[in-house]
Amino acid sequence: MVEVEISAVLGWLATVAFLVRLLPQPLRLLRTGVPDGVSAMAVMNIALTELAWLIYGLVEGLVPVWVVSLPAFPLGLWTVVLLRRQINTRDLLGSGAWLVAIVLGSIFGALAVVLAASVFVNYGPQVVTAIRGHRLEGLAPATWYLALADAALWGAYGISVGDPALLGYCVILTLSALVILGRIWRTRQEALPLVA
């Protein structure tokens, strides 16, 4: 009985952490209008993935997973709308391929495997953009600090319910957040004037 309660608490804490993490980036884009360093493909992939997590949570009976996806999907779409002028053909092709993978995973009963890879697909383009970019002013650092808490809580929940997709989410999101935060810090240091 105690184990069930711990799992439930972890699931709901992870849900709150995830939703809070989704707010800083669109709010920064709305406030500043500066998209520098934000990957449009990553944002589109995230919106598609939220829909897939919703389906997965419903099918597997993981209430915290589908409950968090209900508000996360519109937040993801909102961020796509804010970046709509940045979207190019490559972004559309990359996100279209991701949609095909989600559909095929659903059809062939491999949605958990696809969702484990979703974190890489969602944040890989953002990591690449952060590594290649020299102007990352559009990135909200708060998103990536909150991503560390988000990853830890979902990882703990995944361990408690024995879900491999959530464990994959934890590992890849943690690594992505650390790389992106490192690049934000580095580009800010490079932008500082040298003191004689």
Image (cartoon, rainbow, N blue to C red):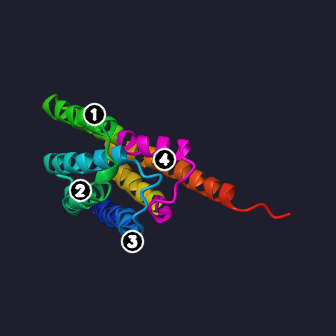
Which mark is in front, 4 or 2? Answer: 2
Q: Main secondary structure of the magenta part?
A: helix
Residue beneath disc 3 = 31
Q: Nearer the viewer, residue 4 or 8?
A: 8
Residue that appears at 24% across and 32% down: 101
Can you give x and y, in whole percent of width and height, for residue 183 in the image? Answer: 58, 51
Q: For the residues marked 3 and 4, what is the alpha-carbon distance in whole angstroms?
A: 25 Å
Q: Secondary structure at mark 3?
A: helix
Residue 9, horizontal then vertical, whole percent:
32, 66
Q: Is residue 140 magenta?
A: yes
Write the start and end of the magenta stretch as one range.
Answer: 119-145
The residue that label 1 is drawn on is 93
Residue type highlighted by circle 2? Leu
Q: Which mark identifies residue 77?
A: 2
Tell me the number on the disc at residue 176. 4
Q: Is residue 176 positioned above or below 23 on the image?
A: above
Q: What type is the residue that disc 1 sits on?
A: Leu
Q: Considering only order in the chain, which callout, 2 or 1, is on the residue closer to the N terminus?
A: 2
Distance (Cα) linking label 3 and label 2 = 17 Å
Q: Position of residue 146 (x, y in %)?
A: 45, 63
